[in-house]
Image (tube, rainbow, N blue to C red):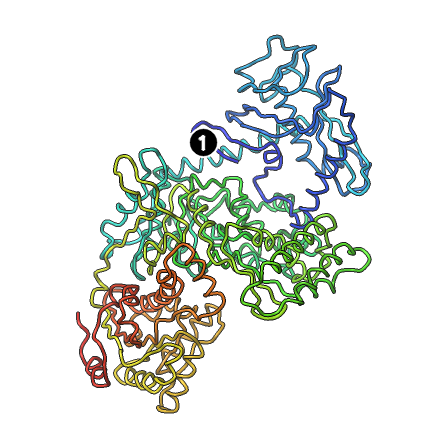
């Protein structure tokens, strides 16, 4: 669906228009849906084969297109007629639909159960008559070029008839719906009636109402007003709004600008700046929607709170904001069923969703944006109406101008349909904002990676009945045998990969023809069935760098090594893209990881346009906020670190003595941290040292930090972990920090494969740099950036490894950490600790 509000036109496929509803659609199970599509194709082929090939009056799969004018809108449609039969009485249009119900049924029941089928036939009849105005004795069949509109090409001598809402004055062709019982092939023909014609026109009324509502919403955006995020610009923000607007401006040929990187430190106020830029784009008509993605739920909540504050109406409390925004949370958080199992048979909240939604008035969630629409409100409304709260949230999205969500809703195959299947989805009219964008390449690669074990296939087999699922059991047993025989390996050999792909294809082909009853399976078993198609798609995609390997026997990993082609394809589709980050990788590395290559030079400049436009505004309050020293006494490489454990432990003790409060220590791994803390406990038993827990949600993280800021002497974090990247509340509370080594990734099969993939198009030293040094030093930048978040804050930071002084490592540190005093012995350390921080 593509809408052009300026010309008041909308482009649809006929089937798409027939099934369009402004609220939630009826729930469908993925595997069953694929099976029904396969059944439909099968019976279409059977009926075509049964037809007389010598019958020149019968045509199959006939392309048709045209424009229907209705209530001031032009519906540009295209599709294929299943059958077009030239009869002596005129053209006969047939649509063929399969049903799982036992036929015959009353025609009224079929109309009530499958209203979209009759609407689809009605649209085809309108399109056919549009292309072929009534002329007695004229041959039937679609014209090569249909008329532009009824008003522009009326029939020469139309017979008398009453005008319908679309403006036709001639009779429609005859239409029939042929229902085919899926199990037996039994057919039931239902003739298209005046009632069906009225239902078709009523459906066009409904769609026209939706288009008018969306057009009115866009008109309101053009007068959007908001409160600035900051009463006065913070230091460094003076020109950033203008700079962003200029960077996003389109070129002379109206092509989108290159994606813009906003590289601003933690505490700069990026959220307010980004929202002001987004609101300005909506008001100016440079975008009709803003898609704001983050990698963490905390980021989404912060954006939503800032947005609501900026859009708060200046009038009475509770007045509606100028635009509507929606924060889409994960499906599991919405669930109110006894068990999280999304099949109609196992979840009563997926039964008859469109009717229940309509009768309960749940459209209020997008019609009245000032009302509560948080998760508790959605869950309460869903329980009361017996409607899945996630479906309520999805139904609200088309009416909202700002969508907030996780990276996965755009880049993960399992989740992206939630956004891209919305009827108003149009990336060419959308401004995309990605916060914490340095995480995007790894997150997208993870979303395309898969794990498959013999144990989970065996568990699925145990739940399949012997009598009704024999074909499925047979192919799944073959898959289990293949997986169970896999040894631990750094990479599968080519023969094993071929066997795997062949077995997966056979498994999927059989499951499409003989689907297992997902509703009777446990959630893990059903989830495995739904995962298998995506797994095969990824494994067969030759455009993606991947590694098929086995970390343990009978456990297969399909790891995406580089998702750059997928990311670049998505980013290029948007009207504008802003990538916000406090710790950007080197520009050439970031552009390559995002799949963005520099365009060819233009004739005007004879210079290549940049793949990325980088804005790095100043943050004067960070100047001299870090007092950095480089500890050259130790070597923290894996082979040498143990012999330096006493020095590392003593250094931590010295930092704690010099500090008025607890010390933050950042380590490359849990194992390394545990060794150092054990040595420190032995040497300095009076110090209270704690190591971050391995798994904790956001609330547990915050509680742990608050408790140990008050009680501990040393807080140990693992670089790259959730604590080290989310410790925003340490700013101003920790004055001394130790970074133990540059946190290079562990050398293993996966990292060797990544380096080898890079080395296929880069020199070996650069491949090593991108595979190991860049991600390692980025973790250091992320952790240290959160120690100074506001004017007046400062920190002494000791980079505890001689590698930090090497140019290859130092050049990847943020500028404020690259230079500092060299510590060669204990006396140098004491002198640095005793010296006041430069300001």
Vertical placement of residue 509 versus 764, above or below: above
Look at mark 1 in the image and give the residue it sits on. 5
**Within 10 Å of the Cα at label 1, are there few (<14), some (14-19), or many (20+) other Cα atoms?**
some
Residue 829 in the image, given as x and y percentages of width and height: 23, 82
Left or right? Give the position of 667 relative to 405.
left
* Residue 657 relative to residue 831: left or right: right
Q: Where does residue 235 sit, x and y in percent of width and height?
A: 22, 57
In percent of width and height, residue 355 lies at 65, 43
List x then y, in percent, for residue 540: 58, 51
Query: Which residue is painted at 47% across and 62% down in the image?
Result: 753
Q: Kindly indicate the quadrant of the structure image that contains residue 557.
A: bottom right
Query: Picture quarter containing residue 623?
Result: bottom left
Q: Secondary structure at mark 1?
A: loop
Q: Residue at x 36, y 85 (%)?
A: 643
Q: Residue at x 76, y 25 (%)?
A: 53
Q: Is residue 486 above or below residue 51?
A: below
Q: Residue furthest top?
A: 157
Up-down relation of residue 576 to residue 808 (above or below): above
Q: Which quarter shows the C terminus?
A: bottom left
Front residue of this view, candidates 145 and 102? 145
């Amino acid at each position: 669906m593509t809408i052009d509000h300026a010309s008041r036109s909308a482009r649809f496929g006929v089937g798409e228009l027939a099934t369009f509803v402004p609220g939630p659609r009826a729930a469908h199970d993925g595997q069953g849906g694929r099976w029904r599509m396969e059944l439909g194709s099968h019976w279409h082929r059977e009926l075509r084969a049964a037809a007389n090939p010598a019958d020149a009056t019968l045509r199959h799969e006939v392309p048709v297109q045209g424009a229907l004018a209705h209530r001031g809108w032009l519906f540009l449609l295209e599709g294929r007629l299943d059958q077009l039969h030239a009869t002596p009485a005129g053209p006969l249009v047939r649509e063929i639909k399969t049903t799982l119900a036992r036929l015959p049924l009353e025609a009224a029941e079929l109309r009530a159960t499958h209203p979209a089928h009759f609407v689809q036939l009605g649209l085809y009849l309108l399109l056919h008559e549009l292309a072929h105005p009534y002329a007695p004795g004229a041959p039937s069949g679609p014209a090569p070029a249909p008329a532009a509109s009824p008003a522009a090409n009326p029939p020469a001598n139309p017979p008398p008839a009453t005008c319908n809402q679309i403006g036709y004055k001639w009779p429609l062709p005859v239409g029939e719906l042929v229902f085919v019982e899926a199990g037996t092939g039994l057919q039931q023909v239902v003739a298209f009636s005046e009632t069906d014609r009225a239902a078709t026109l009523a459906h066009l009324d409904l769609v026209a109402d939706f288009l008018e509502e969306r057009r009115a919403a866009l008109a309101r955006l053009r007068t959007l007003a908001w409160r600035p995020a900051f009463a006065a610009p913070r230091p460094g923000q003076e020109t950033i709004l203008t700079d962003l607007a200029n960077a996003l401006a389109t070129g002379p040929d109206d092509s989108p600008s290159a994606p813009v990187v906003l590289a601003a430190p933690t505490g700069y106020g990026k959220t307010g700046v980004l929202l002001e830029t987004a609101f300005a784009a909506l008001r100016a008509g440079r975008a009709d929607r803003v898609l704001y993605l983050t990698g963490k739920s905390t980021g989404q909540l912060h954006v939503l709170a800032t947005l609501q504050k900026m859009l708060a109406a200046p009038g009475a409390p509770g007045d509606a904001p100028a635009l509507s925004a929606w924060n889409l949370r994960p499906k599991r958080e919405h669930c109110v069923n006894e068990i999280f199992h999304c099949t109609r048979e196992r979840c009563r909240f997926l039964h008859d969703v469109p009717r229940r939604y309509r009768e309960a008035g749940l459209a209020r969630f997008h019609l009245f944006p000032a009302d509560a629409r948080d998760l508790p409100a959605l869950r309460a409304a869903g329980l009361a109406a017996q409607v899945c709260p996630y479906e309520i949230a999805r139904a609200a999205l088309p009416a909202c101008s700002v969508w907030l969500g996780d990276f996965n809703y755009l880049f993960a195959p399992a989740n992206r349909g939630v956004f891209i299947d919305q009827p108003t989805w149009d990336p060419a009219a959308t401004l995309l904002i990605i916060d914490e964008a340095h995480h995007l390449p790894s997150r997208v690669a993870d979303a395309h990676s898969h794990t498959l074990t013999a144990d989970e296939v065996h568990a699925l087999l145990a739940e399949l009945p012997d009598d009704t699922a024999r074909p499925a059991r047979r192919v799944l047993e073959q898959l289990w045998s293949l997986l169970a025989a896999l040894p631990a390996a750094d990479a599968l050999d080519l023969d094993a990969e071929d066997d795997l792909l062949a077995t997966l294809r056979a498994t999927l082909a059989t499951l499409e023809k003989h689907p297992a009853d997902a509703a009777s399976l446990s959630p893990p078993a059903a989830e495995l069935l739904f995962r298998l198609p995506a797994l095969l798609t990824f494994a067969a995609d030759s455009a993606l760098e991947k590694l098929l390997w086995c970390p343990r026997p009978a456990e297969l990993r399909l790891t995406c090594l580089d998702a750059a082609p997928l990311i670049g394809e998505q980013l290029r589709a948007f009207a504008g893209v802003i990538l916000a980050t406090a710790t950007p990788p080197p520009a050439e590395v970031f552009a390559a990881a995002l799949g963005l290559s520099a365009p060819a030079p233009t004739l005007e400049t004879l210079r290549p346009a940049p793949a990325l436009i980088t804005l790095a505004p100043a943050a004067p309050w960070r100047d001299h906020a870090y007092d950095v020293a480089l500890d050259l006494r130790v070597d923290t490489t894996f082979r040498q670190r143990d012999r330096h454990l006493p020095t590392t432990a003593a250094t931590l003790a010295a930092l704690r003595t010099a500090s008025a409060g607890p010390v933050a220590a950042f380590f490359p791994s849990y194992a390394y941290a545990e060794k150092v803390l054990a040595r420190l406990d032995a040497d300095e038993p009076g110090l209270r040292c704690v190591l971050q827990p391995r798994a904790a949600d956001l609330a547990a993280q915050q509680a742990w930090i608050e408790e140990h800021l008050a009680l501990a002497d040393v807080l140990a974090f693992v670089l790259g972990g959730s604590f080290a990247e989310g410790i925003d509340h340490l700013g101003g509370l920790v004055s001394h920090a130790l970074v133990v080594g540059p946190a290079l990734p562990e050398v293993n099969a996966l990292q060797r494969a990544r380096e080898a993939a890079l080395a296929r198009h880069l020199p070996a030293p650069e491949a090593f740099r991108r595979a190991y040094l860049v991600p390692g030093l980025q973790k250091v930048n992320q952790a240290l950036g959160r120690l100074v978040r506001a004017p007046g804050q400062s920190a002494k930071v000791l980079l505890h490894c001689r590698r930090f002084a090497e140019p290859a490592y130092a050049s990847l540190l943020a500028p404020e950490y690259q230079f500092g005093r060299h510590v060669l012995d204990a006396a140098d350390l004491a002198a640095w600790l005793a010296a006041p921080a430069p300001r």
